Image (tube, coloured by chain):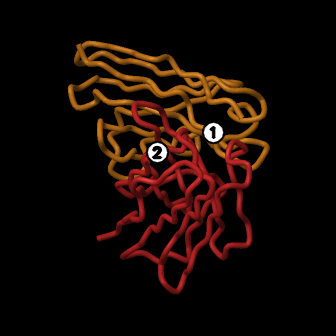
Amino acid sequence: EVQLVESGGGLVKPGGSLRLSCAASEFTFSDYSMNWVRQAPGKGLEWVSSISRTGNYIFYADSLKGRFTISRDNAKNSLYLQMNNLRAEDTAVYYCARDPPSSGWYFDLWGRGTLVTVSS
Amino acid sequence: QSALTQPASVSGSPGQSITISCTGTSSDVGGFYYVSWYQQYPGKAPKLMIYDVSNRPSGVSNRFSGSKSGNTASLTISGLQAEDEADYYCSSNTKSSTQVFGTGTKVTVL
């Protein structure tokens, strides 16, 4: 089955770090740009970061201010998000989402998400 | 980058048509033909409904259609059905090479 499965979420104290992973299966992972999108409890969707097929191009939401780092390992069909200096406002479900090769930028496949809770 | 503006809620009776607006600026919605729309049920992941303003992915009902005029994009659901009750989000490229989502619209089928 074509799918994305996130892992690595959990409870972390303010100022702590967490690394999220997203495992891709049943499609050619290296053909797609990948993204992280988050959703705070009861709130809307917020785009977090994007990485190109080879990792040459990386973009972040301005609000992250250098605390998050996106990366990928095409040999392992995996996407990552390293989150440092976490704050209460980073509490959210984090989704990985696939961006198909096209002139546009949209998300045609989503994982189920992993919950990150930042609390003391 | 501020979120795109959507109405908080839209409602309609079964069989009716409803339209959800998504208003941005010339730096996002107005500057690209790359608006997408997502449907999300409570506790579930979003699902792509429309991409590149008006294209439907395979498997999405033709009751869903998209359009854009200036800085405002729209999603129309025709022949409203109970299963269409969900949250809907628009999204757009920006001139800063980022993505921005809309504030979200809750669709209620009366």
Residue A53, percent across and down? 63, 72
The colour of chain A is: red
Closer to the camera, A99 or B42?
B42
Residue B5, percent across and down? 59, 22
Which mark identifies residue B100? 1
Residue at 53%, 26% in the rendered image: B74
Is residue A99 placed above or below A26 in the rendered structure?
above
Mark 1 or mark 2, whichever is nearer to me: 2
- Considering every residue shown, the one lying at the far bottom of the view is A75
Is residue A83 placed above or below B5 in the rendered structure?
below
Residue A48, percent across and down? 60, 50
- Total label count? 2
Give the residue type at disc 1.
Val
Residue at 54%, 68% in the rendered image: A80
The secondary structure type at the circle numbered 2 is loop
- Considering every residue shown, the one lying at the far front of the view is A120
Residue at 28%, 71% in the rendered image: A1
Give the residue type at disc 2.
Ser
In the picture provided, is A72 more to the left or to the right than B42? right
Residue with the mark numbered 2 = A120
Q: Are marks 1 and 2 on the same chain?
A: no
Instruction: Tell me, by letter, which chain the rendering colours orange.
Output: B
Residue at 71%, 63% in the rendered image: A58
- In the rendered image, which quarter is residue A85 located in? bottom right
Is residue B34 placed above or below A68 in the rendered structure?
above
Residue A86, percent across and down? 58, 50
